[in-house]
Amino acid sequence: MLETVLFASLAAIALSMIGLIFRVIKGPSTPDRVIALDGIGINLIAIVAILSILLRTSAFLEVILLLGILAYIGTVAFAKFLEKGVIIERDRNNH
């Protein structure tokens, strides 16, 4: 029974990934695309977690952590770029 629910959830996540990929490509604005990319990262984490449960292993926990960190850093970088136009600010004080 649990495996059936896990496979059904994988199918639902795959459908949501298709919708998010469509939003990244055809998004009406750049912030919509950024949110869709963040959603793709969250869905990837969910897929890896479900596969880890199905395979009955904890070997993918590091992958889940890495995907979470990369999704967070990417979202913060995109948000900073949208707000200020640059990601890394260089302070050029001429004294």
Image (spheres, rainbow, N blue to C red):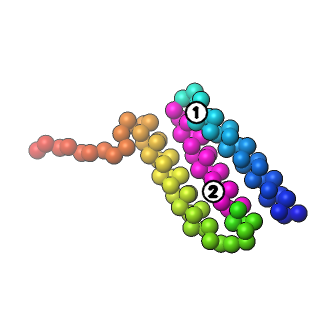
Residue appearing at x 62%, y 71% in the figure: 59
> In which quadrant of the rendered view does residue 91 lie?
top left
Residue appearing at x 41%, y 39% in the figure: 81
Badge nearest the viewer, 1 or 2:
1
The residue at the far front in this view is 55
List the residue tagged with mark 2.
Answer: 45
In front of the other: 81 or 55: 55
Query: Regarding mark 1 in the picture, which secondary structure is present there?
Result: helix
The overriding secondary structure of the stretch rendered in magenta is helix
Res. 1 mark = none
In front of the other: 37 or 84: 37
Distance between the alpha carbons at the discs numbered 1 and 2: 21 Å
Q: Is residue 49 magenta?
A: yes
Return the x and y of residue 88 as percentages of the image width and height. 33, 46
Which amino acid, mark 1? Ile
Residue appearing at x 58%, y 33% in the figure: 25
Which amino acid, mark 2? Ile
Report whether 31 appears left or right of 19.
left
Return the x and y of residue 73 as percentages of the image width and height. 47, 52
List the residue tagged with mark 1.
Answer: 25
Return the x and y of residue 15 as percentages of the image width and height. 73, 43
- Write the start and end of the magenta stretch as one range: 30-50
Of pointers 1 and 2, the one earlier in the residue sequence: 1
> In which quadrant of the rendered view does residue 7 lie?
bottom right
Q: Is residue 50 above or below residue 58?
A: above
The residue at the far right in this view is 1
Q: Is residue 61 magenta?
A: no
Quarter of the image that includes the C terminus:
top left
Residue appearing at x 53%, y 61% in the figure: 66
Q: Is residue 39 above or below residue 1?
A: above
Q: Are marks 1 and 2 in contact (CB under 8 Å)?
A: no
Query: Regarding mark 2 in the picture, which secondary structure is present there?
Result: helix
